[in-house]
Image (cartoon, helix red, strand yellow):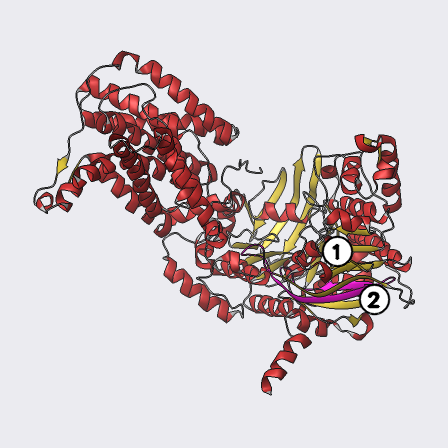
Amino acid sequence: MTLSEGPAAVPLLSVRGLTKLFGSFAACNAIDLDIAAGEIHALLGENGAGKSTLVKMLFGVLQPSAGQILWEGAPVTISSPGEARRLGVGMVFQHFSLFEALTVAENIALSLDPKISLSKISDEAAALSKAYGLPLDPKAHVADLSVGERQRIEIVRALLQNPKLIILDEPTSVLTPQEADRLFETLFKLKAEGRSVLYISHRLEEVRRICDRATVLRHGKVTGACDPKRETPASLARMMVGSDVAQVHRDSASALGDIRIEVTDLSVPARTPFAVSLKKISLKVRAGEVLAIAGVAGNGQGELFDTLSGEYPVTDDGAIRIRGKAVGRTGINGRRLLGAGFVPEERHGHAAVSALPLSDNLLLARSQSDKKAFLSGGFASIIRQDAIRSATRRICEAMDVRKSGEDPQAGSLSGGNLQKFIVGRELDRQPAVLVVNQPTWGVDAGAASRIRQALIDLAKAGSAVVVISQDLDEIFEVATNIAVISEGKLSDPHPAGSLTLERIGLMMGGIHESHLIPEAAHAH
Amino acid sequence: MFEAILLTVITASTPLVIAALGELVTERAGVLNLGVEGMMIMGAVCAFAATQMTGSPYIGILAGILGGGAFSLLFGFLTLTLVANQVATGLALTILGLGLSGQLGEAFVGQPGIKLQPIVFPLLSDIPFFGRVLFRQDLTFYLSMALVVGINWFLFKSRAGLKMRAIGDNHASAHALGINVIRTRYLAVMFGGACAGLAGAQLSLVYTPQWVENMSAGRGWIALALVVFASWRPWRVLAGGYLFGAVTIGQLHAQAFGIGIPSQFLSALPYAATIVVLIIISHNRRTTLINTPASLGKPFVPDR
């Protein structure tokens, strides 16, 4: 699709045949892209489709292997981020490139003209953040800020350079719906000022709502250019994935069984200055139930997972019960022996050792809980390679893990495939209780739907499942009941059918019942 | 008596402060150079040799700075350009420096040295007590004080210092912002080397004006401990340096008075003090995290 406004409308940015090779692998393959002045242009694609590589070339972080970039019609070489900024390109990264030990103003100062004084930058940043509705304290240390606030720094930093094109990489993945709405207002303001926005996302509803045009990437190639408002989410998904994504299927309410995991009035102080303390958390999950815990990143999800899994035991033994047994002081293996399974958030270095093959990763996780199956010789604990290999094969088949070779290193798998393996490793035990933190974070749509289906099926087979997730679509897909975590406090659970996105959003922002009760008590 | 002890404390503390300040800058840029001891002894031998050959201890000071700086360049090339392991390279640098300086200095062993004379500030030096202590010192003392003020200003007030702290905190992000990580680190490593060299020159021209093999006697290691002790803050390096200097001198006097503590125990005091302070400061994790360069010792390879 080309611009129809005639020869007068030279696109702000044109990309012709842009290619980036890593060895013989083409991360981007002959990509064509036009961004007009004053448009919000979506760049859609699954993980690994080449979106980030493309954007890094536009921002001068990577150099293209072939192809041309035209800025306002003239060919340019963007050799460094500084060069990109001089042209008028601003960038808000997905993984924030902020310096935690520095203040907000210092962070902003680093990307500006060194002649401007720090105090002037502070003032300008404060004024700008006010004008665009992004409140910020310039003197705060980044380490003390929430993810949403950190993103604001990135946006203000990009805006201070008065860019013509702003690139946003998955900006809403860390925001509440309300925060996202505020961001969209900012984007519309930018558009009204005649600036262009390149908006990278895999959230189709969002793209349809705010973007004027969309370019879809798959396997490093452009597979479609369209007006997202005229497409359906299904048709966009087809362009992204190349085939129809399997719909996650859930039977309507089945009877719930006994309580499998119970947490009563659990309070845990923060372990590090940047951690969240857990405050009086209570939850009950029955057999057959999926309890989904929603919340914006950094509100205690990781801390809650650590206490549930036993990675950090708590002092009050009775605060956590698995199948009726008090396990607060029991470590992770003791809890696994009771039939619980755990999948942490970080794939590399936490759930899996990247440099070890899948079979070793399987053994590491289950050497205690499945001693009989994988170890022989009693005290000598001799590893039974054959049993482990066949279990690895079984898991890979069950979860459709695509890999190169029989038993590759965990690090060589794509994020989605490794995540399928890690979840499958626990499912293979048929755990009575499964606790999963961010099961499909950074995973492509196909793998995500496979994992979600597996979680639902596990609950249907009579297990209790706790899913901690930031992805609201995922939460509504899998949950029987939904609770929201905010600033280390967990709301009461609500049946999934009784909640709306807006209601959850308000709860995620910290407005929920447990806030209101103490206030009411004060009134007396 | 007190004044005399104070003067020896200043002489003993100055090399610690200077070497630690240099290492502080290196580490603020995210590079861990464990070769301070080696660079220091190279500075000492270069300074002594140049002084003997020219007769001018000021040329000796310059030679010490250049010697330490040039020697650190070897570390920079290995760890920054060839991305070798910083810990191993730093240790190797110390071993190499001790050996090489012994070889270079062989001809100078036993020769009487030329002492760097104090620079006396007129009027100011007439102030009772303070004038004699602060304004009748040699060049290295004044330089050490200027370095504390200068480095503090550079790191926390200047834009270049901000960039250096940014590199030390997160080199990948700094690179993404267009800051030249490798070049800045080369400069920081060479500054650290130059300071270690200057500290070495102070040893062979002021502290004990002669050349003795291994005359740095572990001061490079104390300087390294001082940087952590000071949680990467220049003023705390000054305070810590004088504390360690005082402990060293106090230990000598304690021995002279025949106080019945084994000298080995007293010599170990600075290290024991470092451990105690580390335990105390690690309680306040927030301030520690904000001051500690997060990318310290991590290799950096730009993804191009």
- Extreme bottom residue here? A524
Q: Quadrant of residue B147?
A: top left
Q: Establish whether labels 1 and 2 are both on one chain.
A: yes
The chain containing the residue under callout 1 comes to A
**Picture mark count:** 2
The chain containing the residue under callout 2 comes to A
Give the image location of residue A58, x and y in percent: 59, 48
Give the image location of residue B91, x and y in percent: 46, 26
Residue toward you, B210 or B42: B210
Q: Residue at x 49, y 40 (%)?
A: B296
Where does the N terminus of chain A fall, quadrant-wise?
Answer: bottom right
Q: Where is A106 relative to A182, above or below?
A: above
Give the image location of residue B139, x and y in percent: 20, 35
Which residue is disc 1 drawn over? A327
Q: Which residues are magenta?
A: A269-298
Q: Secondary structure at mark 1?
A: loop
Where does the C terminus of chain A fall, quadrant-wise?
Answer: bottom right
Whole-number angstrom distance, CA of label 1 to CA of label 2: 25 Å
Residue toward you, A372 or A405: A372
